[in-house]
Image (tube, rainbow, N blue to C red):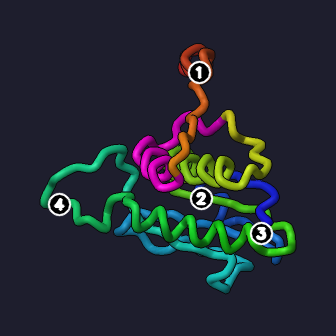
Amino acid sequence: MIESVTFIPRYVAEDMVFNEHQALISITDNDQADALINGINDSQRLLRVRFLDIEAHIEHPKFKDDFLFDEKKAQTILNFIDALHALPEKVKMVVHCEAGASRSAAIALFIYHHTQCDFKNHDKADYANKLVVSVFSTLINKPIIIPPKAPSDGIILLNNFF
């Protein structure tokens, strides 16, 4: 059973040593090497997915279909999550992407909505990739709500700038 979900940047995932009570979805761009993950060697607890951080389907010769998030990738993730959630033991789910802000946040939001697990950094998922959220919402026929951006974000950024 998935007990909790969190999302993090790639460098944090690469610094972690995962244990048998954790599982990971590792998201990378299509042209990047796989993240170096310590402690997980089996496909039951590690899923690697490749797609670009783009928020709309675009028609461009530079982008192949496999570069974008789509229903096939969503179904692969859903199957992985359902298999983990069916386990008798508790699993802490971790999702990483390069920055740990949009793709990983969107997938963590999906996991939260789909499994009703604990999601401590839910309010930080306000930059979730809208395409990923939309594809998952369609797949499970249920709206996935992106948390609103905190009104103080601009003030904090401005204060940090000066």
Which badge, 2 or 3, is on the more N-terminal residue?
A: 3
Asked if 162 appears above or below 21 in the picture, the reply is above
Spatial CA distance of label 1 from label 4 is 34 Å
Give the crowd class for mark 2: few <14, some 14-19, many >=20 residues within 10 Å: many
Residue 153 is labelled as 1
**Residue type marked 3:** Gln
Q: Nearer the viewer, residue 43 or 138?
A: 138
SS at badge 3: strand
Residue 62 is labelled as 4
SS at badge 2: strand
Query: Could you say where residue 54 lies in the image, as x and y percent from the top left?
Result: 35, 48
- In the rendered view, does 68 fall on the left or right side of 86? left
Q: Label 3 near label 4: C-beta < 8 Å? A: no
Q: Which residues are magenta?
A: 124-140
Spatial CA distance of label 2 from label 3 is 13 Å
**Residue type marked 4:** Lys
Asked if 3 appears above or below 44 in the picture, the reply is above
> Does the magenta portion include 133?
yes
Q: Label 2 near label 1: C-beta < 8 Å? A: no
Which badge, 1 or 4, is on the more N-terminal residue?
A: 4
Residue at horizontal 44%, vertical 66%? 73
Q: Which residue is mark 2?
A: 96
Q: Which residue is mark 3?
A: 22
SS at badge 4: loop
Residue at horizontal 77%, vertical 43%? 120
Q: Nearer the viewer, residue 44 or 63?
A: 44
Q: Which tag is nearer the camera, tag 2 or tag 3?
A: 3
Which badge, 4 or 2, is on the more N-terminal residue?
A: 4
Looking at the image, the residue that sits furthest to the bottom is 42
Spatial CA distance of label 1 from label 3 is 32 Å
